[in-house]
Image (tube, helix red, strand yellow):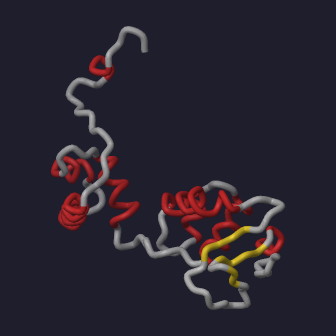
Amino acid sequence: MCGLNEEANTKVGKQKNERRIFTEEEDAKLSMLVSLFGMNNWSIIARAMEGRSTRQCRERYKTYLSPQILNAPWTPQDDQFLIEKYQEIGPRWAEIARLFKNRSDNNIKNRWYTHLKPRVQISSPIMIPSTSNVSSEGCSVIDSYYMFDQTSVLDQSWTFLE
């Protein structure tokens, strides 16, 4: 914006919170404040969290700290289910999250973009990292990856591709 500095663009009375990673101490404090004030008092909680906005506190708790959220490692079955649901309904992360037990929409979106989307191509195999070298439920394991083709995702069967 020509001729305007950043100070002129900020609202009077509002402190601009710069982005930074939550520390373990902040996470512990946030969890404690939520247990005291509940999940409907984010403005009170944010005032007690120096340098954090209401939205930052709410999103951090609901996405990572809530006991209802599962942040466990993804299984090959979770990955297959996500691929199927993405093909079925597209990038509707909140809708897909309702189909998973205890995973946030943000966790699902991040899994898709960082681990699955780079491997999903129409004419090539999809490789899903396995947690062991032991075949389970008829899945073929090669170099610690489960492999299946695009059509097998749709009929929910696993196949070995060479």
* Vertical side of 1 occupied by 107: above or below: below
Q: Is residue 4 left or right of residue 88?
A: left
**The quarter of the displayed image where residue 152 is located:** bottom right
Q: Nearer the viewer, residue 103 or 19?
A: 19
Please state the total of marks drawn on the protein image.
0
Residue 80 percent across, percent down from the top left: 67, 73
Name the spot of residue 122 as percent of width and height, x first. 81, 59
The residue that appears at 35% across and 13% down in the rendered structure is 4
The location of residue 160, given as percent across then percent down, is 79, 81
Q: Nearer the viewer, residue 149 or 39?
A: 149
Residue at image point 68% right, 78% down? 146
The N terminus lies in quadrant: top left
- 78 to 104, vertically: above or below: below
As drawn, 89 above or below 84? above
Quadrant into which the C terminus falls:
bottom right
Where is residue 63? Give x, y as percent.
40, 61
Residue extending farthest front: 143
Q: Residue at x 80, y 63 (%)?
A: 124
Quadrant in the picture for residue 140: bottom right
Q: In the depicted view, which residue is nearer to us: 121 or 72? A: 121
Q: Quadrant of residue 29?
A: bottom left
- Left or right of 123, for residue 118: left
Q: Is residue 37 visible?
A: no
Q: Would residue 51 appear left or right of 59 to someone viewing this image?
A: left
Picture residue at 62% right of the left edge, 79% below the top:
144
Residue 16: tell me if it is visible. Answer: yes
Q: Is residue 4 left or right of residue 27?
A: right
